[in-house]
Amino acid sequence: MQLELELALRFLRRRKGVLLRGTSLAALTGVAIATAALVITLALMDGYQRAIATALQRGSAQMVAFSPRPLAPAKADRLAVGVAATPGVRSAMTVTYLAGLLQDPKQPASPLSVVVKAAARPPGFVGLKAWPAAQKAIPAVLGYRLAEKIGAHEGDTVEVLLPPRQGSWLLPSLSLQVVGTFHVAFAEFDEQWIVAPLAQVLASQPGLGVAAIELEVDDPMHVARLHHAVEKALPGFMVTDWLEMNPALFAALRWQTLSLFVVLSLVAAVASFQVSSALVVVSVEKRRTSGMLQALGATPSRIRRLLMEVGCLLGLAGVGAGIALGWLVSLVMTHYRIISFPPGLARVYLVEFIPLKVTIPHLVAVAVVCTVVVVLASLWPARRAARLDPVTALRSV
C-alpha cells in the first residue's frame, strides 16, 4: 500500500500535460465547491432551526401548564411554588393571556390584533427586574416593532379593546402605559405581543383569573422528560411545551434539511465525474508507466489500487478544501449578518437574522457522503485501466 501511495502522489505531482493539469484542477475545484455547498446548506438550516428555537424559548415559556378553569391568584401562586420544587424545573410563574385590538392613533379605523401576556413578574426578555408601581395606567412593555408601527414611546398611553364578557355587547378595555420595549427577534412576538403585570390586569378586569403557569426548565431541548413529573405536581392541568406547540414547523424544517442534503449530494455526485475524467486522463498519460510496472511484476489489482488512490487523493483534497471553504464562508456570513430580513420578510421566515452554525456531526456526514461518491467515481476508470495489456502499454508513446 505504501508503494501505491508513493506512486499516486508522484503521478499527481508530475502533471506534464495541459490536459491532465486542466482536468485535475477541474476535478479538485468541482468537488470542493459541491462539498462547500453541502456544508453551507446544512449550517444554514441548523442555524435557522436554532434561531427559531432560541426566539421561541425567549418569548414564550419552555413549558406551560394550562388550568381547565380560571384560578384565583392566591391558589395559582401556591401551585406555582409547589411545581417549582420539581427536579429539573428552574422556576414557575403565573400568567394569563388576553387577545385584543390595539388602537392605532395613525389609523383609528384599523386597530391592530395583539396578545397581552399578563405575568406575575417581568419575563427575562423585557429587561425589567420588577414591575414599576401603578401610575395613570397599567405599565406595559411592547414589542419594539409594534411600538414603531403605532409610534408609541415611553410614557405614552395605549388602549387595548378586549372581547366582550358573556351576556354583554360592550368591549372592555385595558389602559396601558408604555414603560419600554422588548426585542425577541421573532416576528410574531415583536409585532403583536404586549407584556403587563398580572396583578394589575386582574384588578382592572373583574372576573378574570390566572390561566396558566409557565415553567422554565434546566434543559429546554429535553422538556418531554419532565411532563410526567409536572402533571403529577399539577393534577388536572394540560401540560405542553414549546416543541409540542410547534410540531409542524420543526418537522417541516427537518424534512427541508434532509431534502436539501439529498439534492446537494447529487450535485456532489455530478462533480465527482470530474474525478473520473481526470483519472481517465491519468491512465492515458501514464499508460507506459503502468505497462512498465506490470512488466516488473505488478499485478492488475495493484495497478487498479494505484489508480484508485490517485482518484481518491484528488477527490479527498477537494473534499477537504470544500469543508474548509464552507466553514470559512459560514463564519463570514454569520459575522457580517448576511442573511438578515426586513420586516416584511421577517414575518415569512419568522426571524430577523439566520446565523450559520457548523456542527461536527454535519461535517462528518458531508465528509462521508463526498468520500463515498469520490471512491465510486474512481472505481470504473481504475478497473478499465488495470485491464490494459502490458505489451500494448509498452508500445504506446
Image (cartoon, helix red, strand yellow):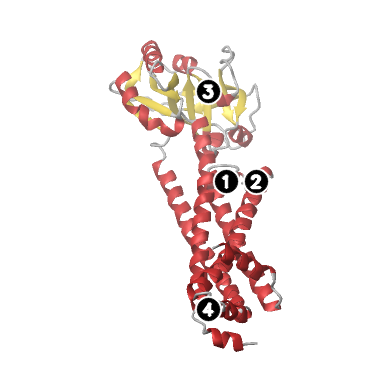
- Checking the image for residue 385, the label placed there is 4
Residue 166 position, x and y percent, is 34, 25
> In the displayed structure, would residue 189 be above or below residue 311?
above
> In the displayed structure, would residue 262 be above or below residue 134?
below
Look at mark 2 in the image and give the residue it sits on. 331
Single out the mark in the foreground, 3 or 4. 4
> In the displayed structure, would residue 89 be above or below residue 323?
above
Single out the mark in the foreground, 2 or 3. 2
N-terminal of the two: label 3 or label 4?
3
N-terminal of the two: label 2 or label 3?
3
Residue type at mark 1 is: Val
Q: Quadrant of the C terminus?
A: bottom right
Residue 355 position, x and y percent, is 60, 43
- Rounded to the nearest angstrom, the CA distance separating label 3 from label 4 is 70 Å
CB contact under 8 Å: marks 2 and 1: yes
N-terminal of the two: label 4 or label 2?
2
Callout 4: SS: helix
N-terminal of the two: label 3 or label 1?
3
Is residue 115 shown left or right of residue 240? right
Look at mark 1 in the image and give the residue it sits on. 358
CB contact under 8 Å: marks 4 and 2: no
Q: Please identify the residue farthest to the left as the structure is shown.
A: 236
N-terminal of the two: label 4 or label 1?
1
Dot 1 alpha-carbon crowd within 10 angstroms: few under 14, some 14 to 19, many 20 or more:
many
- Rounded to the nearest angstrom, the CA distance separating label 2 from label 1 is 9 Å
Single out the mark in the foreground, 4 or 1. 4
Q: Please identify the residue farthest to the front as the structure is shown.
A: 296
Look at mark 3 in the image and give the residue it sits on. 123
Residue type at mark 3 is: Pro
